[in-house]
């Protein structure tokens, strides 16, 4: 009798797994989920626009839809875990989720309100979708997620043509679909990197789309510019050239680059490091020696941090944040300071744990071109994080999941000989022409 019940339960679990496999085997579904999860606030802005057109106070169509759809992804992940379809617990994912839950809890302690918002919800869903997809339907995930990123970038380029001055009403800086000069690269850089990852994993079929994506990224960077973006593209190119013909060196790791970013911040604030780069800052980047008042802002933030270094102070209302930061800023413009301010050493510890676990797994597959590409991007973002934050960008922590599942990303992928990327592209182009 017991054996019959056990067999029935196994059969039922098998049917649920089969349904989930059928749903998540479609790259179009991944693309649909990703388009929503990557930029949820843009969709919420559409709600505001519709509300103004219809003359109503609130019209939460896309807001509600986004919450419902990403909640379905979260439920699917929990079902996968309950059905033991997930190979092993991902410590990187657990560390990131723990960090966000702690930030929400400490916000409630200090402010009596939740810090949870739609970007976090979308970020959780995106991370779990990637963690689940890499283990079950890696190729469909790469096609869908990268396709969604391409859509955002191409639509942004179209906005340049249709609205050459700015898509939104002119403010301090012109803005298009992906935001102004401090926001657009948070989608463009991952889109370019994952386009190459798709090419490395799925083969030369995606070479042309990768080249087109690189051109679109180049146009976007040239049009929107931004000091942090220019530094980021310089660092990424230098790392790519340095690691071009070799396996990923152990010293090129997210852990060490995060430590380097912390050292740069300390050097700027306590040892006048900026004086060594005064020509670059003022003549090339056209910034002030305070990095557009960032150093002044960091002094104020450090005073607050030193009062609650262990726990942080949670999330303030935006109006209060701007008040204590001099009226111009709603965040700290530094990734580590942002976490220290809101979550203290506890949140930073969880953040570093996530980076450590992701790096540890990635280094086991450092000969993989796909793993190398994602690692170089995360290292670049660590340096860019000296002057900006990526904490509320759903795609940022999702990149850690790619590294932490490097075994799934490289499974069944033939290791390439040590040739330069340019030579490989030329070789694949010749092979593609020969088959036409």
Image (spheres, rainbow, N blue to C red):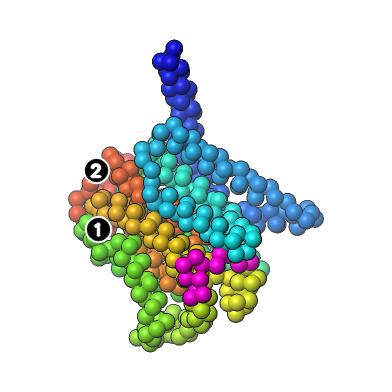
Cα–Cα gap, marks 2 and 1: 17 Å
Let me know if residue 310 is in the magenta part.
yes
Q: Residue at x 40, y 83 (%)?
A: 270
* Residue 169 visible, this angle: yes
Per the image, the residue denoted by label 2 is 414
Q: What percent of the width, then of the height, locates residue 84?
A: 41, 33
Which of labels 2 and 1 is toward the front? 1
Q: Of helix, strand and loop, which mostly describes the magenta segment?
A: loop
Report the front residue among 283 and 137. 137
Q: Is 201 above or below relative to 242? A: above
Res. 255 image quadrant: bottom left
Q: Which residues are drawn in magenta?
A: 305-317
Q: Residues within 10 Å of mark 2 (few under 14, many from 20)?
A: few
State which quadrant residue 274 falls in.
bottom left
Q: Which mark is residue 248?
A: 1
Q: Residue 383: horizontal and vertical position, in percent? A: 38, 69
Q: Earlier in the sequence, mark 2 or mark 1?
A: 1
The residue at the point 30 percent across, 68 percent down is: 238
Dot 1, how many residues are within 10 Å of its Cα: few (below 14), some (14-19), or many (20+)? many
Vertical comparison of 158 with 293: above or below = above
Quadrant in which the N terminus appears: top left
């Amino acid at each position: 009798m017991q054996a019959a019940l056990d067999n029935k339960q196994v059969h039922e679990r098998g049917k649920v797994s089969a349904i989930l496999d059928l749903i998540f085997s479609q790259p179009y579904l991944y693309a649909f989920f990703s388009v929503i999860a990557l930029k949820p606030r843009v969709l919420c802005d559409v709600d505001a626009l519709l509300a103004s057109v219809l003359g109503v106070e609130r019209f939460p169509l896309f807001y509600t839809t986004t919450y419902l759809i990403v909640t379905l992804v979260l439920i699917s992940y929990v079902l996968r875990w309950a059905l033991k379809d997930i190979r092993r617990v991902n410590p990187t994912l657990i560390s990131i989720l723990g960090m966000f839950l702690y930030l929400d809890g400490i916000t409630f302690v200090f402010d009596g309100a939740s810090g949870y918002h739609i970007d976090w919800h979308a970020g959780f869903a995106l991370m779990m979708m990637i963690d689940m997809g890499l283990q079950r339907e890696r190729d469909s995930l790469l096609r869908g997620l990268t396709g969604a990123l391409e859509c955002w970038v191409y639509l942004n380029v179209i906005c340049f043509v249709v609205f050459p001055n700015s898509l939104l009403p002119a403010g301090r800086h012109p803005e298009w679909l992906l935001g102004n000069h401090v926001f657009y690269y948070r989608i463009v850089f991952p889109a370019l990197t994952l386009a190459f990852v798709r090419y490395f994993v799925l083969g030369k079929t995606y070479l042309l789309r990768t080249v087109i994506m690189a051109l679109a990224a180049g146009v976007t960077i040239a049009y929107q510019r931004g000091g942090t973006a220019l530094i980021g593209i310089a660092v990424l190119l230098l790392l790519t050239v340095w690691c071009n013909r070799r396996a990923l060196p152990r010293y090129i790791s997210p852990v060490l680059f995060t430590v380097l970013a912390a050292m740069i911040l300390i050097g700027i604030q306590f040892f006048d490091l900026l004086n060594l780069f005064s020509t670059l800052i003022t003549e090339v980047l056209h910034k002030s020696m305070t990095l557009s008042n960032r150093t002044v802002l960091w002094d104020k933030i450090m005073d607050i941090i030193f009062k609650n270094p262990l726990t942080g102070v949670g999330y303030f209302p935006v109006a209060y944040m701007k008040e204590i930061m001099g009226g111009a800023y709603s965040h700290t413009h530094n990734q580590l300071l942002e976490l220290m301010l809101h979550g203290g050493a506890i949140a930073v510890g969880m953040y570093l744990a996530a980076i450590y676990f992701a790096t540890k797994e990635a280094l086991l597959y450092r000969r993989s071109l796909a793993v190398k590409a994602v690692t170089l991007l995360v290292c670049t973002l660590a340096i860019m994080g000296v002057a900006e934050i990526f904490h509320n960008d759903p795609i940022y922590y999702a990149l850690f999941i790619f590294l932490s599942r490097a075994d799934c990303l490289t499974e069944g992928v033939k290791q390439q000989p040590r040739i330069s990327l340019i030579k490989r592209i030329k070789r694949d182009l010749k092979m593609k022409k020969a088959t036409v």
